[in-house]
Amino acid sequence: MTPEDIARYRAETQGVKHVLHFNNAGSSLTPDPVHNTVVAHLERERQIGGYEAKDEAASRMQAFYSEASGLIGAAPDEIAYVENATRAWDMAFYSLPLKEGDVILTAQAEYSSNYLAYLQMAKRKGVVIEVVPDDNQGQLDVAALKRMITARTRLISITHIPTHGGLINPAAEIGKVARSAGVPFLLDACQSVGQLDVNVEEIGCDMLSATGRKFLRGPRGTGFLYVKRELANRLEPVFVDLHSADWPEDNEYTLAPGALRFENWECYYAGKLGLAEAIRYARSIGLKEIEQRVLGLAKLLREELSKLRGVTLTDTGTRQSGIVTFVKQGHAAETIKMALRAQGINVSVSSGDRARFDLLKRGYHDVVRASVHYYNTEDEIARFIRAIGEFK
Ligand SMILES: Cc1ncc(COP(=O)(O)O)c(C=O)c1O
């Protein structure tokens, strides 16, 4: 990615004129083509009616599936458009035929909502949750995962990049274990899709959930689910409606083929077009290029932060993502966030209460999360470092 490329991406990102945005893991700044696509569709809905605008855009709506599948190396019928990553993940997870005694293997850095779903299934059906320990680098210990697989293991469910730290879990190695054991593998790729070059074949996952607004730079309220065709066709979705199923006889229904059965009828159509555009935009830049730039900027940010007195980096893992987390002695993370916001600098706070087996276990209640994207610059990092240095 050349300086000219970055200048062009910034020229197409109006937000960079107003804020220093290190909250791409929260919700990124949308580029102009995405914003314009959403607004144009809303305008057509206003002018000619929602159903009519949808019909008019039918082929562009359909292109969403080829864009999303092309992004992750899947087929278009393996993609469902869902309103966010949580519901996408839920549609897969709650559709699995789990029963009493079945074991779910997950990781210490698992996303909190996913873990709550495991707890609910443990309460409802008596499934057993087993948390695979981390290795000494803080990533999932693949050898331990292998040892923990038994005849009762029904699911391996892992978050690729946690919401609360720089770790990149070794998804492809986990996929190898899952495949050789014949256990379905559900990957929460909410923070990795759009940031890394994610390919479902290379990873070997059977289901994957993603969101629109984070590293894909799409609209809020959009996401998608991937389910491998053979598995999708075997799964009974947790909900059915007139979109995911037909009603051919009084007492019968037939499910839509492939991942379509995980969708529902009404959805945010402007968002669907906007997400398709966001994916097109990312693919036109190149996911490998994006990954290289994001990881390089994050590395620089970590190096510079580590030089500041009183700052402790809290990221783990051998490979680290564009999410950079830290604490500064004597200053609550929330205070830092709000003081930065007053200067036009955006970050988030990640809470240990939502990462009980990771942050909390390591003694962190709140950490500052600064997440970079390819359109951020070295100058922005320098300004950020000065701002953090001001907290004495
Ligand atoms: C790892 C991870 N999974 C899932 C989610 C949920 O995504 P959404 O808000 O789109 O449902 C998040 C959001 O922060 C996340 O970081």
Image (cartoon, rainbow, N blue to C red):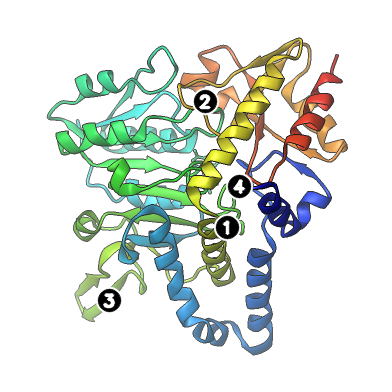
Q: Position of residue 84 (x, y in %)?
A: 51, 53
Residue type marked 1:
Gly
Crowdedness near tag 2: few (<14), some (14–19) or many (≥20) residues, C-alpha within 10 Å = many
Q: Which element type, helix, strand or loop, lies under badge 3?
A: strand
Residue type marked 3:
Asp
What residue does disc 3 label?
246
Mark 4 Cβ inside 8 Å of ligand 1: no
In the displayed structure, 243 sits above or below 15; it is below
First in sequence, mark 2 or 1: give its number. 1
The Cα–Cα distance between marks 4 and 3, rounded to whole angstroms, is 48 Å
What residue does disc 1 label?
221
Mark 1 Cβ inside 8 Å of ligand 1: no
Crowdedness near tag 4: few (<14), some (14–19) or many (≥20) residues, C-alpha within 10 Å = few
The Cα–Cα distance between marks 4 and 1, rounded to whole angstroms, is 30 Å
Left or right: residue 141 versus residue 271 is left
Left or right: residue 295 versus residue 227 is right
Q: Position of residue 38 (x, y in %)?
A: 64, 70
